[in-house]
């Protein structure tokens, strides 16, 4: 992967202060798609992700807050429990038509009384 190839990233954060947390949330909504309250998918090159992390650094308190970005593997598979933030049936695709879609599987919790 070159610095300019667009790939999918998972960006997640844990912000201790509510005001900073809202700033990071607003910032991330402009750069990615939310999967959960503090987890986003961002499609960006490595160079763009580096710049995005520098911009996030200005919004957080490095001593107490935590922001992480992980390159999303291709092909990706996800398993879900509970009520998702992303509507059921939504297929997440990269801009390149050849990239595979994310496959999700709803998991059911086994009954405690199963025989």
Image (tube, grey):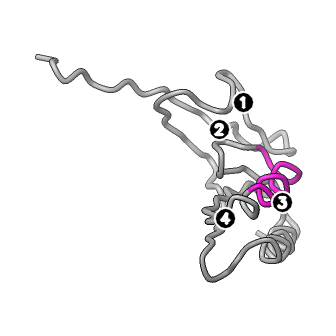
Residue receiving disc 1:
91
Nearer-N-terminus badge (1/3): 3
The verdict on residue 23 being magenta is: yes
The answer to whether mark 2 and mark 3 are in CB contact below 8 A is no
Q: Is residue 105 above or below residue 13?
A: above
Mark 1: few, some, or many residues within 10 Å (few <14, many ≥20)?
few
Residue tagged 4? 17
**Residue closest to the far left:** 115
- Res 80 visible: yes
Residues tagged 3 and 4 counted as in contact (Cβ below 8 A)? no
Label located before the other in sequence (3 or 4) = 4
Sequence-first disc among 1 and 2: 1
Place of residue 7 in the rendered image (x, y in percent of width and height, measured from the top left): 77, 57
Give the mark, 1 or 4, whose residue is nearer the N terminus.
Answer: 4
Location of residue 104 in the rendering, given as x and y in whole percent from the top left corner = 56, 32
Looking at the image, residue 47 sits to the left or right of residue 103; the answer is right
Q: Residue at x 76, y 69 (%)?
A: 1
């Amino acid at each position: 992967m070159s610095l300019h190839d667009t790939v999918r990233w998972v960006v997640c954060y844990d912000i201790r202060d509510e005001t900073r947390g809202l700033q990071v949330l607003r910032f991330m909504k402009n750069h990615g798609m939310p999967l959960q309250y503090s987890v986003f998918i961002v499609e960006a090159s490595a160079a763009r992700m580096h710049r995005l992390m520098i911009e996030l650094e200005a919004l957080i308190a490095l001593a107490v807050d935590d922001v992480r970005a992980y390159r999303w593997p291709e092909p990706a598979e996800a398993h879900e429990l509970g009520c998702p933030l992303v509507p059921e049936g939504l297929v997440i695709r990269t801009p390149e038509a050849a990239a595979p879609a994310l496959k999700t599987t709803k998991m059911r919790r086994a009954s405690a009384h199963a025989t």
